[in-house]
Amino acid sequence: MSTIAVSPSTTTAPNFSSSSSSLKTNPLVLRPSQVSLLGSSRACRSARKSWCKAAKKDEKNQYEPQNADHKSNKLDRRNMLLGLGGLYGAATTLGGLTPSSLADPAVLDLKAAVKCERALKDDTTPRGMKCCPPDFKESEVINFDPRNYWSPGLRVRPAAHKVSPQYAAKFREAVRRMKLLPEDDPRSFAQQAKIHCAYCNGAYHIAGTTDNDHRLQVHGSWLFLPFHRAYLFFFERILGSLVNDPSFAIPYWNWDHPDGMYMPSIYTQDGLSNPLYDDYRDEKHFKSLIDLGYGGDEIKKEDNTKIPEENQIFYNLWHMHVHVARPKEAELFMGGRYAAKDKYSINSPGTIERVPHTPVHIWVGDPEREYSEDMGSFYSAGRDPLFYAHHANVDRTWTIWKGLDGGRKEFDEADFLNNFFIFYDEKKKPVKIYVKDVLDEKILGYKYETSDTPWLDPLHPVVDHKPLPIPPAVPLKFPLPLGISGFQTKVPRPENRVKDSEEILEIKVQQKASKKYIKFDVYLFDEHNHKTPDGKTKSAISYVGSCTELPHQPHEGHKTEEIPTKTLLMPISEVIKNVGAENDDYVTVAFQNITGELDSIDILGIKIRYL
């Protein structure tokens, strides 16, 4: 097969070096055995002189962590996190710690992973996929080290709607070659899709657990963003190797910018002759402006009038503001904590996962299919090439979020940093990669093409574009069935106010498994309930957030009678100010059922607290 020419990247590589003084005091400096991984002394003389020099000063081939905080289950980020402070700690750093210094991360059981179990209860799924990538032996697994995957310069991921014809041709060719690989090849497109299916449908047991319901699930918690970043990294590496271009980078779907709020044409043109095309999509959306808060066709049940395009653009930008700019804490944006003791991981999805991530999935998926395949269901989403561009923009959004307000903090618990996943690389080798390995995308060798972020600018919500019908008022007594009409109820605010601290709306939700997309929206008003002149409630300034859930099949052996609860955390200080409720002791919280499920959702608790 011919190779398509490409110009080498001219961007600079991330700096692995650090000042000698910081390396002298760092107990996790690399030893001579790790320095040899650079391949030669010549590599040491390149961009990493001080790093190599300092490493050679310590001849002991062992790690001596001195900053573990056993009581708080935290590790000193200065000595642990790759990329921060200019030092990359070897991938096995945490793995070498004594058990007492670690907590209980929800990692896959490597022995059980060798015998990957069916992730779907029903063998008759439309695509007949059992979600098991090729088996591997635990002894074959290698630890991730970025130096084994490094090439000059940073790979630059472009916005999909702006790519050149030359790039589009190379991208098509790379995916075409991936699809032509034998299906049992771990680099094949089919196997790449199975990886997502396996991690998202409970194919792997959690290490140290015996209950069949203790299966690893990377959605609904702090694992969501790191898993998908690592997943895209190896997918991208495989594509680059197939066209002999180590500088190749996958595109991102720039749906947070008005110019990118359409399905990129490189994925829709030329039908099935295009390897980027997927016939399990909603064709009526091929040339439609995306709705980042999409609620399915049911949202139009009251009337069939189309929202003016300028209004839809505003709502899309407002969703980005609400779900990315507004949540300042990691637990709000990234998702809740998840350890091996937790039976289910889908218990506290972050704002970015709830919206716009999930609505985009369902907007792309085919509503005529039972589970809205491909993009509209966990098990099949990876079979659509557009999935990878969608998640690239989710990943880009994570990077943007971290840079806001002078730098927002991520989690530093060992349960988070010491979690790991297994992927196959471009050489067909199974690689163990830790969460701590993916916290800085530049260490992984890529960055994103710059694009404006208009949703970060001050927005002035229009209060009467999309008024909310007033739902019935109910007392604050649980459980509260959501019902077709939703409801509103008065909720007390904390008695002791903490100045400059974020107030959080905490909602406990219990929902049954459903073959349909689930979505409800949450609004907040002052205790007297703001209304527009026509008697309807204001929406944009009162919008707090949404609960979303893709159609989902439980894994094999899952006890469907055990219905997990979900905790939704939504920042509301900005909303309280917007609606003029700063001095109110109570606020009105309203729930709007978007998807129309009558009996699938119960609200088990509503309270306002400080994070």
Image (tube, rainbow, N blue to C red):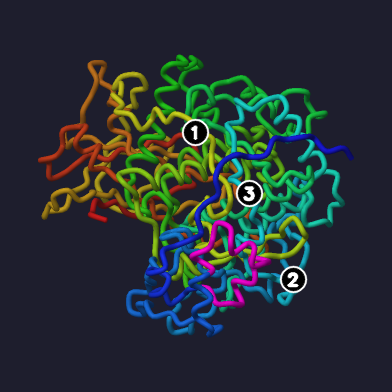
Looking at the rendered structure, the secondary structure element under dot 1 is: loop
Please state the extent of the stretch shown in magenta in the rendering. Answer: 30-52
Looking at the rendered structure, the secondary structure element under dot 2 is: loop
Label 3 crowding class (10 Å Cα cut-off): few <14, some 14-19, many 20+? some
**Label tally:** 3
Residue of label 2: 115
* In front of the other: 437 or 567: 437
Left or right: where 217 falls relative to 498: right
| 189 lies above or below 161 | below
The quarter holding residue 74 reads: bottom left
Give how far apart the Cα atoms at labels 2 and 1 are. 43 Å
| 78 lies above or below 260 | below
Label 2 crowding class (10 Å Cα cut-off): few <14, some 14-19, many 20+? some
Which amino acid lies under the numbered mark 2 shown in the image of this protein? Lys
- Residue 494 position, x and y percent, is 16, 53
Looking at the rendered structure, the secondary structure element under dot 3 is: loop
* In front of the other: 493 or 472: 493
Give how far apart the Cα atoms at labels 1 and 3 are. 20 Å
Residue of label 3: 152
Q: Is residue 339 visible?
A: yes
Give how far apart the Cα atoms at labels 2 and 3 are. 38 Å
Residue of label 1: 450
